[in-house]
Image (cartoon, grey):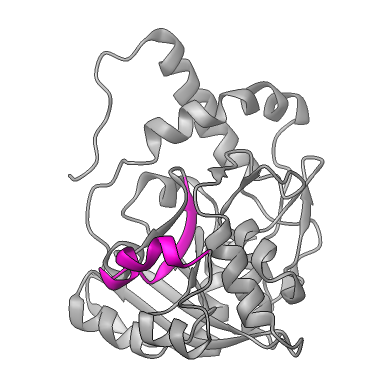
């Protein structure tokens, strides 16, 4: 077990964990207006399952909960294999959005749905040079990290930071989505925005309406607003749900194309197609 539980925690922290558990389950639901999958079911259905007063009561404890529960894991991801990760990364291009599912983490079990986290591939030194961004002021301070293997920018409980493939892809499932944006110069602007956000704090309340802190999918939206990622109103706030983003891409979103889906379990690794991805999403949101 690579994670840990805090023994002898204070009464306040015990209460925070209990309340935070409730908050994650409540706030991470999806939308009132679900779409239909290939199997005729619903993705991201049944949003507001609990009273609003309860959500409002536990919300202030979200940061405490996130810091305690975030590190807890009981196994590596099924994609935690160097050869598998190299093949996956070899098929990526700068600014591909990679959405992951980690059921070996406690947060992956608590958050409803199939996918819980979104990251952005920013590329290697060679790729950043090809885009004319290697000497950009936002990139220069992070050259050594990139040369050391960092390829992704993500927002999690540690804030916005660079990560290597070995950290991002220590997961069970990964979907690569490729932006289709016609605006001239969007790649350079998006990369500059991503690097400029390094060090920004994490939004434990998953509120897409605040600008001082960012959660994972909100970082993607902030860097590439042209994608117009779907927002759902849940408990009075706008939020962005990873399952909804993947669902719309798999259905043929003209601005975000499905590139690859890799899924692992105890029996091995497979690369399902679009139809199976939609079915997997459906199974994660039963009626």
* Residue at image point 34% right, 84% down: 88
* Residue at image point 50% right, 33% down: 21
* Residue at image point 57% right, 79% down: 278
Q: How many marks?
A: 0
225 up-or-down from 273: above or below: above
Judging depth in this view, the residue of 53 and 198 nearest the camera is 198
Q: Position of residue 47 (x, y in %)?
A: 72, 49
Tell me if residue 141 is in the magenta stretch: yes
99 up-or-down from 65: above or below: below
237 up-or-down from 253: above or below: above
Q: Position of residue 55 (x, y in %)?
A: 69, 30
Judging depth in this view, the residue of 200 and 140 nearest the camera is 140
Horizontal side of 35 relative to 65 (left or right) equals right
Position of the C terminus by quadrant? bottom right
Q: Residue furthest top?
A: 11
Q: Position of residue 25 (x, y in %)?
A: 57, 41
278 up-or-down from 206: above or below: below
Position of the N terminus by quadrant? top left
- Residue 173 location, quadrant: bottom left
From which residue to which does the magenta span run? Answer: 138-156
Q: Position of residue 5 (x, y in %)?
A: 27, 29
- Residue 148 location, quadrant: bottom left
Residue 171 visible to the viewer: no
Horizontal side of 278 relative to 53 (left or right) equals left
* Residue at image point 48% right, 87% down: 93
Residue 275 visible to the viewer: yes
Horizontal side of 96 relative to 109 (left or right) equals right
Tell me if residue 129 is in the magenta stretch: no
């Amino acid at each position: 077990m690579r994670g840990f539980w805090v023994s002898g925690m204070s009464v306040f922290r015990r209460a925070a964990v209990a309340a935070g558990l409730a908050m994650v389950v409540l706030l991470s639901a999806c939308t009132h207006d679900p779409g239909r999958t290939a199997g005729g079911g619903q993705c991201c259905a049944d949003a507001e399952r609990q009273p609003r007063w309860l959500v409002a009561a536990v919300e202030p404890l979200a940061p405490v909960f996130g810091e305690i529960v975030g590190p807890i894991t009981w196994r590596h991801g099924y994609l935690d294999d160097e050869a598998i990760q190299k093949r996956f990364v070899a098929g990526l291009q700068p600014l591909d959005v990679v959405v992951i599912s980690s059921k070996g983490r406690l947060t992956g079990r608590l958050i409803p749905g199939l996918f819980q986290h979104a990251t952005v591939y920013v590329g290697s030194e060679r790729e950043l040079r090809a885009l004319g961004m290697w000497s950009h002021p936002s990139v220069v301070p992070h050259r050594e990290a990139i040369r050391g293997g960092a390829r992704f920018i993500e927002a999690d409980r540690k804030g916005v930071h660079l990560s290597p493939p070995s950290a991002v892809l220590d997961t069970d499932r990964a979907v690569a989505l490729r932006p289709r944006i016609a605006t001239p110069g969007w790649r350079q602007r998006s990369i500059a925005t991503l690097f400029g956000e390094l060090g920004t704090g994490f939004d434990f309340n998953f509120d897409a309406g605040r600008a001082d802190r960012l959660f994972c999918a909100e970082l993607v939206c902030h860097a590439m607003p042209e994608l117009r990622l779907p927002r759902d109103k849940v408990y009075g706030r706008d939020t962005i749900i990873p399952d909804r983003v993947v669902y719309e891409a798999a259905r043929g979103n003209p601005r975000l194309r499905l590139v690859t889906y890799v899924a692992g379990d105890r029996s091995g690794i497979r690369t399902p197609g679009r139809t199976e991805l939609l079915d997997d999403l459906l199974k994660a949101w039963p009626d």
